[in-house]
Amino acid sequence: MSADSPLLFTREGGLARLTLNRPEAANTLDTALSRALFEAAIECDENEAIRAVLLTGAGKLFCGGGDINGFAAAGENVSRLAKNLTTILHGAVSRFARMGKPLVVAVNGPAAGAGLALAMLGDIVIAAPDAHFTVAYTAIGLTPDLGTSWLLPRLVGVRRAQELALTNRRVPAQEAAEIGLITRVADNVLAEAEMVASALAEGPVAALGGTRALLTRSQTTGLEEQLEWEARSIAAALRGAEGREGVVAFLSKRKPDFRKA
C-alpha cells in the first residue's frame, strides 16, 4: 500500500496496523477512506494470520469525523452520498465489532463525530494527553451515525451521553478516561498501544474473540440467556487447541504458547 493511500495497512506477525492517512484533511472520512476501511475490516476479520488490530491516525488529529467538504460539494445529491457512506462505514464498524480478534485504538489527537465512533469501537482505547473527544453532530445540524448512539450510552451511561450528544461539550483525554469513554491516557500513546496490541496478538485469539462476543451479547441478553452462552463458549474453548494448551501449560507450570495452538 502506497504512502499516499487514504488508509495505511501493514502487518507484522499477527498484528495488523491501520492508520487513517488524510492528515491534511484531519483524517476525515471521505468515500475513498471509507471504502478502504471497509476492505481492511473484512481483511482483518477473514485473515487467520491476523490476531490483533491496531487503529490510529496520521498527523495531529485522530479523525475529525465525516468529510463536510464532500457533503457540501454533493449539492442536491447529499442524501444519496450520506446513504452510500453510511452503508460502507456501518459495514466496517460491524466487521470490526464482530471480528474474533481484539481491536486496540491509539487516539493520537482530537476525535470528533465519526472519529469518536471509531475510537469507541476499541476494546482498549489509549489516548494522548492532548487528545479530546466531541460528539459534534448536532453542532452542524446532523444526527449521530457509525454506532455512536449505541456505543456512547453503554460506555458512559445514558444521562452523560445525553449531555455530550446534545451540547457537544469537548471532553479532555483525562476526563474521558475517568468516565469510561476510553481506557487510559499515555504520554507515548502509539508505543503504549503497540505494546498492548502486540501482547494481545501473542495471546489466545479464539478465547479473546469469544470473550469479545460474550461482552457484546451481554448488552442485549438477559442473565439466563447469557449464562447459557457462557457455558457453550467455555465448553468450546476447553475442546479447542488453545484451551488444551492453556491447561497443559498451567499444570506444567510454564507459560502457554498460544501461537502454536
Image: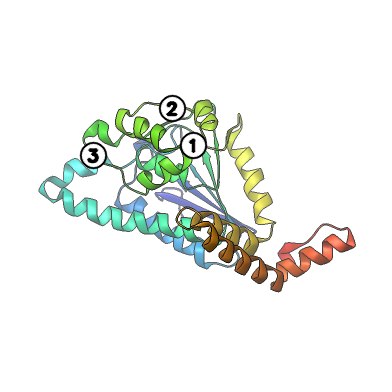
Quadrant where the C terminus lies?
bottom right
Which scheme is used to colour this image of the protein? Answer: rainbow
User: Disc 1 to disc 2, how far (Cα)?
Assistant: 9 Å
C-alpha separation, residue under disc 3 versus residue under disc 2? 19 Å
For the question of whether residue 261 can be seen, the reply is no
Judged from the image, the secondary structure of the residue bearing numbered disc 3 is: loop
Task: Tell me which numbered mark, 1 or 2, is placed earlier along the sequence.
Answer: 2
Q: Would you say 188 lies left or right of 255 here? A: left
Image location (x, y in percent) of residue 138: 26, 34
**Circle 3 residue:** 142
Image quarter for residue 259?
bottom right
Q: Please, what is the three-letter code of the amino acid marked with disc 3?
A: Leu
Q: Is residue 104 above or below residue 225?
A: above
Q: Which residue is mark 1?
A: 181
Q: Which residue is mark 2?
A: 171
How packed is label 1: few (under 14 Cα within 10 Å), some, or many (20 or more)? many
Horizontal relation, residue 167 to residue 53: left or right: left
Mark 2 and mark 1 in contact (Cβ < 8 Å)? yes
Residue 221 is situated, as x and y percent measured from the top left of the image, at 47, 58
